Amino acid sequence: MTVVSVDPKSGGRLSRLAEVIREIASRPSGLIGLSLVTTHILLAIFSPFIVPYDYRAVSADIMFNAPSSDHWFGTDHLGRDVFTRTLLGGREALLVTGIATPVAVGWGGFIGILFGLVGGRIDEILMRIVDAFLSLPWILKMLVLIVTFGTGIEVLVPTLAFFYGIPVIRIARAATHDVVARDFVSSARARGHGRFSIIRRELLPNVLDVLMVEGAMRWSWMLLAFSSLSFLGFGVSPPTPDWGLMISDSRGFMSFAPWSLLAPVAALSSLIIGINLSADALAKSLGIDRAQKAPV
Amino acid sequence: MAEGNLFEIRNLSIGFTSRGGKTLPVLRNVGLTARKGETVGLVGESGSGKSTLALAAMGYLKRGLRVLDGTASFRGRNTFDLTAKELKEIRGGEMAMIPQNSGQSLTPTMRIGTQLREALHLHSNLPESAYHDRISELLSQVRLPDPETIIQRYPHELSGGQQQRAAISMALAGEAEALLLDEPTTGLDVTTQAHILELLRDLARETGTAMVYVSHDLGAIARVCDRVAVMYAGEIVLEGPARQVILAPAHPYAHGLLESIPKLSDTSLPKALEGRPPAPGAVGEGCSFVDRCALAREECQRVRPSLKRIDSGELIRCHFHEEVPKLAEAATAANVKLERKSHSRQTFLSLDQLSISYGKVGLLDQLLGRKPNFVPTVDNITIKVTKGETIGLVGESGSGKSTILKSIAGLLGPAGGAIEFDGEEALQAEVDKRPADHRRRIQLIFQNPDESLNPRHTVAEILAQPLRLYFDLKDRELTDRSIALLERVRLGPHYLNRLPNQLSGGEKQRIAIARAFAAEPDLVLCDEVTSALDVSVQAAVLKLLNTLKHEHDTTYIFVSHDLAVVRALSDRVAVLYQGRLCEFGPVAQVYSLPSHPYTEILLGAVLEPHPDAVPTLAADDVVELSPPARGCPFQRRCPRKVGTVCDTVEPPWQSDAEGHSIRCHISLNQLLAAQTNASGQRNDTPILAESAATP
């Protein structure tokens, strides 16, 4: 049955983004996810202006204070305000992953689409290299680089972007394979369009949905990875407030001062859950079955 | 309720609620009955509600649909009142459904025998020990050769026709009293289709099953059905005995639908039924067909015609049905004879001993320097095409028709031979290496516009691509040219902002055609361009292709599995089997005797929309997966096989004075004699022969 609905709309990029966001928000889980993520991003931007205390202010008098009206989330083992540090603790993580995620999806997506289009032996060889990379635990690979080059942002961003781009290659290649077999790509080839013109005009628009969902998922995994690195002491260095670091610092005092642990844990989890819910809603509204499309 | 009616649908309306909260009807006041032993056909264009009606008869509604009015009952029980459990018992047991694409409805991981066993377990009272015999019986009932082997097979090990047979045997397992067939032969080869239809006819006779046969193919309907109901925009507009509906359609829509079918016996272009059916809810107060009807008057706009019985016995929804015969006269008078210009004899495109192979040399073979010996998919194709000519390529699926087109387009490198273009030079195999001018002059149009148009691009963007690439057009010029192109394919400028999913099938194919003609090509390769379209739309697209060709003196290579379509458009026809040429020559000669035995079978299997048309089924519908290494490619299925010479020696080309060539060991005279004897007075209208042999 053909139900043709005709609503001529200008097909601009921005309106498409707005449409996608509206689609996500139209699902309850998506709306929750989106609000969580938005809240965290707004906090990351504005928290320096609203925090009640200096995050470095150490005081031996108020060590391990329970939550009170002065210190909403209590104080930690150095007497620092946990609320202040929790509010600020996501900034570094969001900054690093906020840059690294688009870079990872960008380069991984490009390579994946290119090799998906070219195919043949080169593609086979590349995929075996990708497999080899994926067979090693990511934490080991990253630790090697970070130990060698240091733990600054200028090392963390490229490292995360590199390692998290590799699985994207695989996703982008698989999605491209579905599209390349279709006649409009053959049609473009028969007309004599160049390889990059085909990638830009024919493939990318049809792979973009998958890449967007993939990007959202990579972002949440990357946040976890970043926090794990901090937890292990390879991320940001003290006294910069960071959730991973805070969890690491406070875990010894869990039994008598759980607030200093629970606050960063809740913050990190809510962000991850928010991203995951948004990604799920995004996938559903774009009609992508993540169970199928995410083999890695 | 009337005696003996298995299905009885009364005044049924089904609809859905739109996003705007309006109730849009998909079926409107439909009535249909089917008695035991009767086959009722439902015909109409896509979107006419025929499948919805068939499913409603089973008590099934697609998601979002609901009954607005009326009843559907099966053996006196209203199917919409039944509980899920009761329905489960009826379905598959008392009534069964055979879907369109049975390859997809069979479970891929289960052997055929196991699937049948399951069906028996659910729908019969047989003891477990009797299953095996019953399964063999069922499989022989659907004429599957060697049931014992088939039982062990997985669905993917069967051909399309065999899968369809297996699905039919499953439907028969519960000894259903009623069968619903939803386009059971669509997508199958002509020969396979003819076999399946004969099988269904026999089954109806043997078992006395009531059948509801849904199809857009009037040829199939004519062959199988006793009664036909023609549906349009969710209404039954005409219902009557199949013979009468097909020979003298009393409704203008049915008339138009029949006129739009290309016929083997007719060399003119079929007449298109312009326009498209209204979307659900878009039907006004008047007749639903008013916008496309040649007889429409003011009254038709205002008053919805009621379903009334006319003197000749049909039920019809039309105010002016008495005038329909006049339409027929007018149509005959206005018969557009296809103008066949005499072409310059200069060769424009030449395929010289072209062979194409899909086989790939494996890595190991490459390292060891071995060259495995493939039997090429397409071999030894030599065709010379003159400027402005249309060459038709026909054959069953797997005959290499599309492969040849892809090779000419440069998408698939040939393994041997050469393609010469415009007399000057051999074409580079790879499209990337061809000069830009060659790429522009050769354009390819694909079968399915859903696949060949990028779903993310607007029509403007789709048309802009060749215009930017070949002519470097920008801004104003680009838009002007795009609008001009749209006009050439009879579409308005407002289509520029639409996305492909906002267009109908015919409109999409027009856009694909416009995109090809944007390049101002000299050679257009048409790959089954109409097979994904409704017949009425097909006629319009054929007409458009013909007009464009005459405007630009374009050369076409037209690939189709439909012999009637090829006949309507082509100057010369090449018949392919397993990637080898069997017969080649001017269209009139190829479609008359003598024929290559393969052409004979193809022609015999074509179903004309005529109740007396009887297909000749000379060969099995087995599908061969690869051509034989030696001898005649058609040796394994040929009903006129001479002997071992066919297996070992490649048959010679035999030509007559008109340039008609047949590749066979039997001489032309002997072929002619044999074929004339076999089919009586079979000559110009081979299919309408009354005395043709039935299996």
Image (tube, coloured by chain):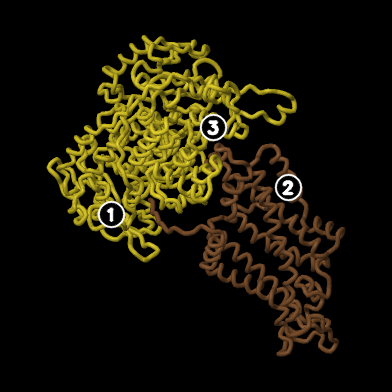
Of all chains in the rendering, the one displayed in yellow is B
How many residues crowd around disc 2 within 10 Å: few (fewer than 14), some, or many (20 or more)? some
Q: Residue at x 45, y 36 (%)?
A: B163
Q: Position of residue B343 (x, y in %)?
A: 40, 22
How many residues crowd around disc 3 within 10 Å: few (fewer than 14), some, or many (20 or more)? many
Closest to the observer: B504 or B124? B504
Residue to which mark 3 is pinned: B409
Residue type for callout 2:
Val
Q: Residue at x 67, y 37 (%)?
A: A120
Q: Is residue B198 positioned above or below B468 on the image?
A: above
Q: Is residue A194 positioned above or below B619 on the image?
A: below
Display colour for chain A = brown
Q: Position of residue B620 (x, y in %)?
A: 41, 25
Closest to the observer: B633 or B521? B521
Q: Residue at x 42, y 11 (%)?
A: B666
Closest to the observer: A193 or A285? A193
Residue to which mark 1 is pinned: B72
Q: Chain of mark 1?
A: B
Q: What residue occupies the far right of the structure in this picture?
A: A148
Residue to which mark 2 is pinned: A130
Q: Residue at x 14, y 43 (%)?
A: B322
Q: Same chain for marks 3 and 2?
A: no
Q: How far apart are labels 1 and 2 at the CA level?
A: 59 Å
Q: Position of residue B451 (x, y in %)?
A: 49, 43
